[in-house]
Amino acid sequence: MSEIPFPYLHNHSERIALVEGENTYTYSEVNARINRFASGLLADKDDLQEERIAFFMPASLDYVATMQGVWRAGGIAVPLNVASAVSELDHYLSCASVTRLVANPEYQESLKNVCASLNIELVSVDDVLVDELVPLPELSLDRRAMMLFTSGTTNKPKGVVSTHKTIRAQITTLIDAWEWSEDDVIPLFLPLHHVHGIINILSCGLWAGATVHLFAKFDVPTLSSQIAAGTYNVFMAVPTIYVKLIQYFDTIDPAEVRQICDGFKAMRLNISGSAACPVKLFNQWQDLTGQVLLERYGMTEIGMGISNPYHGERRAGAVGQALPGVECKLFDEYDSPITEEAVAGEIRIKGENVFLEYWNNATATKESFRDGWFCTGDVAVLEDHYYRIMGRSSVDIIKTGGYKLSALEIEGVLLTHDDIAEVAVIGVADDTWGEAVTAFIAVKAGTTLEYEALKEWCDGKMSSYKIPKSLVLIDALPRNAMGKVTKPALKEML
């Protein structure tokens, strides 16, 4: 059987590839299971011919066998969020024209009806596995390999299609930039329907020959004990996870906190991504652990495009510079490149890391490109050669009184208030200002906050036109599975 030239594992290695609970699996064992699964998918076919096969399962050996098995058999892998509501699943499955859904037995009862209504075969990994292997198809790197859905924070989720070449570029760029090696050990607790977990952690780890510890969910005590024991040397998470860890430290013995922080300090790399890392959090984490978080920028359509350096200055509030093999430029609203520093523009990306298309949506695909550049919809400024994200042009850029403001910048300042636990800022239609800066704030337990007190606190900390015109107190911000605040939901509250 020929070696797979795209996201592969070390076929003959007895090194530990995966750790799942008390179980460990070598690269040889994982590869054997993948090939059994791929052979079962093929049955009497020579090639799946880009059949869309979805899977609904948390991080596990079976998840890896399914994803890689679909790739090797010539299908398109469609990983789904196990926290999705049935109505959301209906959209994903029908949009992708899925033919088979692979799910663990404990999920199958809840999936029966939606599969029946869409004429989708519902199976488990054990249903598919076979003992007799069949020849796997020879596949071009230009073949479609995976479909992930956009987060839906600004519109209906779209199916983002990547080829094997796309996936390979996304992985190898990060392996070089972040110096992955087979000595790395990393925990994976992020949802596996998103590029952060699938590419940045799982696929990079397996391509490099590293060891990936799989967690079905984020388990703070278990993870913390492993970190204190020095199990991991790389850690990747979203800002919300770092916040939860800091909150956990407040509930345990200081000696235990020191052990955990020492465990982090000994690591070679801590990364934050998928949502903006507030400067306050960046500084808190460095004070606690000695780790300077490496913040990077990416999205479903491009994998990672920009990153702070592995060696060199990592700036709080900045996402760094274009990754090797990735072209990045800022453009103004007239599609002209911006050549001056500190002038805001839309980030546009070129490179083999860029996706192929939105599934069955030629119009959206065409509209997302300009002269070969993918238009991210994110606005940034370049400051001394480092990109700083200002936010999504559609939800994070507020046009008020003739100014264009970054909601993320205002949020970063508000988060330094001692009584504020979390905050989201949006623009609300206003006859006077065009859009009025509105802050949704969750305060810390035992505290309260009045608008006039907030306004007074803001004076001197930000320009007067950036100070929120109104304050809405809420218990918690609405977030998606990756910790991003769903700002359209905030507008609906009003």
Image (spheres, rainbow, N blue to C red):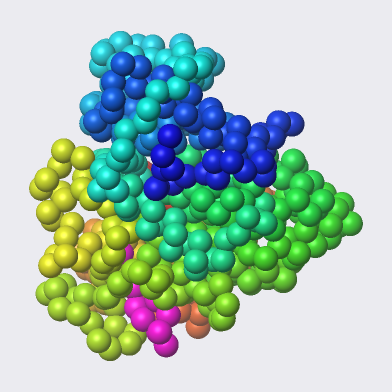
Residue 274 position (above or below residue 413): above
The percent coordinates of residue 291 (x first, y second) are 68, 69
The percent coordinates of residue 35 (x first, y second) are 47, 29
Can residue 184 be seen by looking at this rendering?
yes
The percent coordinates of residue 226 (x first, y second) are 77, 47
**Residue drawn at point x = 49 percent, y = 48 percent:** 203
Can residue 202 be seen by looking at this rendering?
no
Q: In the rendered picture of this protein, how many numbered marks are placed on residues?
A: 0
Q: Give the side of residue 366 with respect to residue 349, left or right.
A: left
Residue nearest the observer in this picture, 242 or 33: 33
**Residue drawn at point x = 82 percent, y = 51 percent:** 229
Residue 195 position (above or below residue 379): above
Res 431 → quadrant = bottom left
Residue nearest the observer in this picture, 117 or 476: 117
Instruction: Spot the residue most to the front.
Output: 1
Residue nearest the observer in this picture, 61 or 483: 61
Residue 442 position (above or below residue 415): above
Where is the N terminus found, in terms of image quarters?
Answer: top left
- Is residue 398 inside the magenta stretch? no
Q: Give the side of residue 95 with respect to residue 294, left or right.
A: left
Residue 297 position (above or below residue 34): below
The percent coordinates of residue 116 (x first, y second) are 30, 11
Q: Give the side of residue 42 with respect to residue 481, left or right.
A: left
**Residue drawn at point x = 71 percent, y = 53 percent:** 232
**Residue drawn at point x = 34 percent, y = 27 percent:** 53
- Is residue 384 inside the magenta stretch? yes
Main SS of the magenta part reads: strand
Q: Which contiguous range is marked in magenta?
A: 378-388
Res 18 → quadrant = top right
